[in-house]
Amino acid sequence: MISITNQLELRHLNYFKVLATELHYRRASELLFISQSALSQQIKQLEQILKVILFDRSNKKVALTDAGNLFFRDVQQIMNKLETAVVHLKLYKEGNTGQIGIGFVASAMESVLPSLLKKFNIDCPNIKFQLDELSNSDQLIALQNESVDLGFMRSNHLPEGFTSRKVYTETFSLVLPENHPMVKANFKHIGQLKDEFFILFPNEQSQLYYQQILSLCADQGFAPKVAHRSIHAPTIFRLVENGMGLSIIPTSLAAGNYPNIRFIELKDIPQQTSLFAVWKKENTNPALPYLLEMLPKGD
């Protein structure tokens, strides 16, 4: 009796992954350089092999069924593993020994990452880095799909199968336009700015961080009026510069030279923000344990 795995071919998985991503036969077929009818035949063949319907084709729309969603998650991991294997082989042929994918929030590049990567590169010069700036939620997706091996995020609220380590703790800083009347000399507490509009990180992208901001405002008896939201520090700074609101950021992001804005560090408050290194427990990248050993302690 021929097993299902013996009938499956790599092209089936690739066609399925592209269609599951695009959810549109024409776009998917163009990306795959095959006709729509050929793609449709391949998907039907895959469904016959698996004996399950992967796509709901009703109402002239393409959508994944529950079984399709389940299969999609596993196929993403398989294809990512295959891509990683090809990269590792290429690096081996070039005299290198591996690659680590790292996701990070912007403040990590202003704090722990540069020294960590430098130290690791000295000890393991043949292991290359792939660096991607991603939000907390996008990092978790990438870690689950194993398109990155290690994440640096401002949350340790993790799904099952992940682990974390605190690597850095720092204060918050207030961001104001250069012409704002509030300066360090007359600043006492954040409550003095309760009537201002604020530009904050989205709650759904960084819940722990967002709740800390609400907490430090609540300690002064107010809830911030949120005018705009962004996860990108340059965007936040530009909005502040143009009078669109104030912001509160990790102090490490205030390290650059920004002539049209200024910062006031919030030192005398209980709230501080922590950066966590996060990885998938079942990650099999042989280079990852070496990097984990070098992580700083953030307590």
Image (spheres, grey):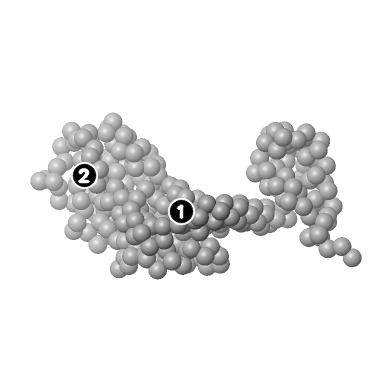
Residue at 18% x, 33% y is: 179
**84 left or right of 204?**
right
Q: CA distance from mark 1 to mark 2?
A: 36 Å
In the rendered image, is residue 141 in sight? no
In the image, farthest residue toward the left: 185
Q: Nearer the viewer's eye, disc 1 or disc 2?
A: 1
Residue at 65% x, 44% y is: 21
Instruction: Tell me: residue 294, above or below residue 199.
Output: below
Q: Quadrant of the C terminus?
A: bottom left
- Which residue is disc 1 drawn over? 128
Q: Position of residue 34 (x, y in %)?
A: 75, 35
Q: Position of residue 245 (x, y in %)?
A: 29, 37
Viewer-closest of 218 and 149: 149
In the image, farthest residue toward the top: 242
* Residue 259, quarter of the rendered image: top left
Secondary structure of the residue carrying numbered label 2: strand
Q: Position of residue 215 (x, y in %)?
A: 31, 57
Q: Which amino acid lies under the numbered mark 2 shown in the image of this protein?
A: Phe
Q: Which amino acid lies under the numbered mark 1 shown in the image of this protein?
A: Lys
Q: Residue 263 bears which disc, if any? A: 2
